[in-house]
Amino acid sequence: MAKHKNWYWPQIWSIVKNKFVLTTLGFVIWLGFFDKNDFLTTHSYRQKLHQLQAERDYYEVEIEKNKAYLEHLETNPDNLERFAREKYLMKKDNEEIFVIVQEKPEQE
């Protein structure tokens, strides 16, 4: 039974000793681990690419929201006045503004 299990090791060893197999194996190892475009670098580049694409999509949506909001402000002067009063605390000459700031509770 021991002879039957080990009959393929000499065949495999003769294939592995082949100079073309060794050269190909060395080339694959070199490209996979030691080259400037190895597996880890390529993986990190792909992760960065996906992150940048997600950011791009987010900013495209935000740009569309801001364009719609800008058009909303430009079409009605009352909306623009309300925005200026709320965001930049602008006031008319005969008005006073009181800003109420809510304090956050202390965390222990």
Image (cartoon, rainbow, N blue to C red):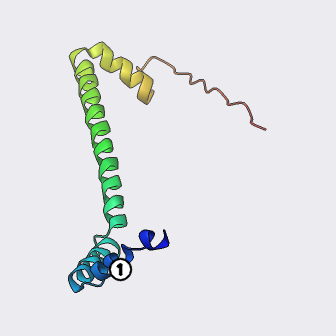
Q: Name the amino acid type tagged 1.
A: Pro
Q: Is residue 37 above or below residue 45?
A: below
Q: Is residue 38 visible?
A: yes
Direction from residue 87 to residue 21 in the image, left or right: left
Q: Can residue 90 be seen in this view?
A: no
Direction from residue 20 to residue 1 in the image, left or right: right
Q: Residue 52: x, y in percent?
A: 31, 49
Q: How crowded is mark 1: few (under 14 residues within 10 Å), some or many (20 or more)?
A: few
Residue at (47, 17) in percent of width and height: 95
> Badge 1 is on which residue?
10
Q: Residue 98: x, y in percent?
A: 56, 22
Direction from residue 80 to residue 105 in the image, left or right: right
Q: Residue 69: x, y in percent?
A: 28, 23
Residue at (45, 17) in percent of width and height: 94
Q: Is residue 82 above or below residue 66?
A: above
Residue at (72, 30) in percent of width and height: 105
